[in-house]
Image (tube, grey):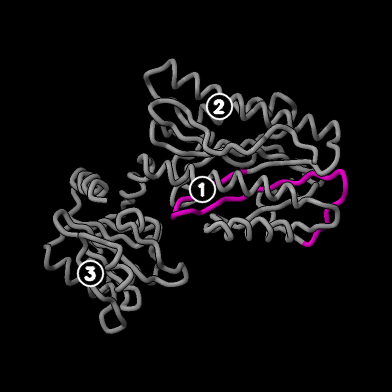
Amino acid sequence: MNLRLQKLRKLMSEEKLDAVFISSLQNITYLSNFSGFTTEDRDAYLLITQKKQYFFTHEIYKEAVIKTVQGFAFIDIKREYPISSAIKTLVEKHRVRRLGFEDFDLKVSEYEQLTNQISKKILVAKDLIGILRIIKDQEEITAIRNACKLGDQAFTYICKQIKTGISEQELAIKLDFFIKLHGADTSFATIVAFDKNASMPHHVPTAAKLKKNSLVLFDFGVKLNDYCSDMTRTVFFGKATKKQKTVYETVFAAQNKAINLLKSFLINHKSPITASEIDKIAREHIIAQGFSPIPHSLGHGIGLNVHEFPRLSPISEEKLASGMVFSIEPGIYLPGEFGVRIEDLFAIKNNKLVQLTNAPKNLLEL
């Protein structure tokens, strides 16, 4: 964790910030290695100066935090001494003239409470930790790989649960239960979609019953030791139609084109490739086969959050580099008919592309 603080302080110096105020739970976890807070309430904050680091939390969490977190000064926050007052005290103590804060995370009411105590003029909206989190260290990549391994096992399990008459909701529950039974949590709401429901990328599972010769799309993730996985597989319960096979093969080929381009570039070029170039080759292949463009980005970064930077989109200017972990997930969606998506996670390590999800993705007719 000290190395992460060192990197943060280097960025602070470059941005001429005297301190940064951190409110997002994932960024708190990243710097402190503590993640035992609920998402319903604000239970923790950090303040990092060039020489000190402060951890603010309520009395109900203090014992657990102190057992886990080292190197921080702990400050109780309560109704009589809210976070805005605590920040004011430290801003004055350390003579802070430029204070970075996470504008993407603070509510308007929280911002107003803060600026009732300190001047708006010293506040600078900066997500420095988000910049640090783009590049994963070996420990983080291993954590994501372990989450992916459990996801692979979950896919093997759920394929055996597919049967006539089972509903989308039932399969989603079974999948979630398997993940939780193995000591993890889901990294987002599990998607199970049959036939025409699969044409909606973010479909919410329903009571729809499975029939023979149907398409089944699974999009799910595992959260293990704070790090997330994400994988999509499309399978067929019975026989796939000729059209379904054509769509599947097109999506499969689009993903492989993106993967092969990135592998080739990493081997043969010294300069990094932009994320938009990877998106482009998959997108153009799908269009060339007569289908509509992918309605979402080809991929996204992943880590403590299921969606992080980099973004593999048509407008992304980010360069893909060693330490990045991201998805490649082309899809074709035919409204009222069906949809096919294949998603895998990859890491770039030592300038080589490493696939982290390894569940079968050849066309499966169960």
| Residue 223's disc number | none
Region of the chain picked out in magenta, as a range: 207-231
Front-most of 241 and 105? 241
Instruction: Give the left or right position of residue 211, taking residue 278 as reference.
Output: right
- Which of the 4 image quadrants contains residue 55? bottom left
Nearer mark to the viewer, of 1 and 3: 1
Element at badge 2?
A: helix
Q: Residue furthest right?
A: 212
- Provide residue 23's location: percent of width, then percent of height: 34, 62
Q: Residue at x 33, y 70 (%)?
A: 64
Element at badge 1?
A: helix
Report crowding for label 3: few under 14, some 14 to 19, many 20 or more residues within 10 A (C-alpha).
some
Q: Does the magenta stretch include residue 212?
A: yes
Mark 2 touches mark 3? (CB < 8 Å): no
- Provide residue 192's location: percent of width, then percent of height: 71, 52
Distance between the Cα atoms at labels 1 and 3? 32 Å
Q: Does the magenta stretch include residue 259?
A: no
Q: Which residue is drawn at 66% across and 36% down?
A: 360
Reading the image, the residue beneath label 1 is 147
Reading the image, the residue beneath label 2 is 259
Distance between the Cα atoms at labels 1 and 2? 21 Å
Element at badge 3?
A: strand
Can residue 274 be seen here? The reply is: yes
- Please name the amino acid that badge 2 sits on: Ile
- Please name the amino acid that badge 1 sits on: Ala
Q: Looking at the image, tell me whether mark 2 or mark 3 is earlier in sequence order.
A: 3
| Residue 74's disc number | 3
Distance between the Cα atoms at labels 2 and 3? 46 Å
Q: Residue at x 24, y 62 (%)?
A: 47
Front-most of 110 and 12? 12
Q: Residue at x 73, y 60 (%)?
A: 169
Q: In this view, does 116 lie above or below 79?
A: above
